[in-house]
Image (tube, rainbow, N blue to C red):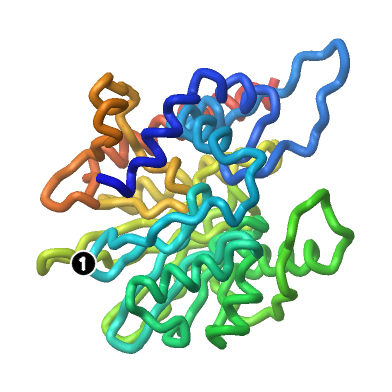
Amino acid sequence: MKRYQWLANAIVILLAASPVLAQKGTDGGGHADAKAGIAQQAPPISWNTKMPWGPMEAAVRTRWAGLPLTAEKVEPFKVFDNVYYVGVQVVGAYIITTSEGLILIDATYAETADTVLEGIRKLGFDPASIKYLIITHQHFDHFGGAGRIQRVTHARVGMSAVDWEGVERQQSGPQVGDQNLGLPLERDLIIKDGDTIKLGDTTLKFYVTPGHTPGSLAVEIPARAGGKTYRALSPCVGINPSPDLTKPYINSIERLKNMGPWDTLLPNHAFLMPRDSAIAPSDFIFQDLKPVKESYPGVIGPERINQWFDEILMVAKEKLASEEK
């Protein structure tokens, strides 16, 4: 399928990419570790390179490294009957359609806010119909475009309290590198653990799951297709390099697993999706990495998702053990 072509293309540079990421380090959300390497000492372990998505993330990030963020444009596409991808190549965003308007999950970069809006229009929807904009966590590649989108749509913006504080601290502080933090946001909806948002025929449930950031939100979404409703989870699973967040991260991942069974995932980076590690020659020739399919192409199934959670927990517990030495 054409929408997976960029993933297949990215695999071609995988071998060159992995050493780069191993040296630089990311938190699974595109943010380089703050600690610089010290001469004569081994570099810190980049734990996300050990995660199930490590090779795919390395390939994808290397593919788009050095290009303007606006070059990450991707054609929007339908995932489920009521869920559409409107993000960019590296960072995800989703539109949830309801009987009374739209809900947008994440805003991508400040530089690509208009790309998100353009994608929504391409799908035949009016951005003015967005009633809620949910920001899953306080990293600039997810909240950067929110101010622009809010000004265009007048949507309510929701985030956890501690991550609201993080965004406010970043937007009021000094510029860090070349990060564009977007138009200033004013605190709006404070989403607490267990809260719900109901819009028309759709109810989203929220869980505060510290680990990727102190106040990361996981979102439970009723994904509909073919007359059936599936339990979809949008989690924040990149592991933070900070030792202070390792135990909370493990607790959050275990909690999400135990809240299953989940039918599918809607990750805030496409490369986080569970995928088979074996890549066959046909995947290169036909430019199509075949997703695991059940009754509907977007469905992964609880067995594969639980395996994915277990793989994540294995790495996280290894990180914790190294920090407790």
Residue at 58% across, 53% down: 210
Task: Report x, y in % for residue 253.
Answer: 46, 44
Label 1, on which residue? Answer: 224
The answer to which of 324 and 245 lies nearer the viewer is: 245
Residue at 52% across, 40% down: 250
Label 1 neighbour load within 10 Å: few <14, some 14-19, many 20+? some
Question: As displayed, is residue 50 above or below residue 71?
Answer: above
Question: As displayed, is residue 194 above or below residue 154?
Answer: above
Is residue 313 at all visible to an observer of this figure? no
- Secondary structure beneath label 1: strand
Residue at 56% across, 75% down: 158
Residue at 27% across, 28% down: 283
For the N terminus, the image quarter is top left
Task: Report x, y in % for residue 196.
Answer: 42, 76
Task: Report x, y in % for residue 104.
Answer: 45, 72
Task: Report x, y in % for residue 291.
Answer: 25, 39
> Relative to 47, is 170 on the left or the right?
right
User: Hey, which quadrant is residue 49 in on the image?
Assistant: top right
> Relative to 171, is 296 on the left or the right?
left
The answer to which of 320 and 128 lies nearer the viewer is: 128
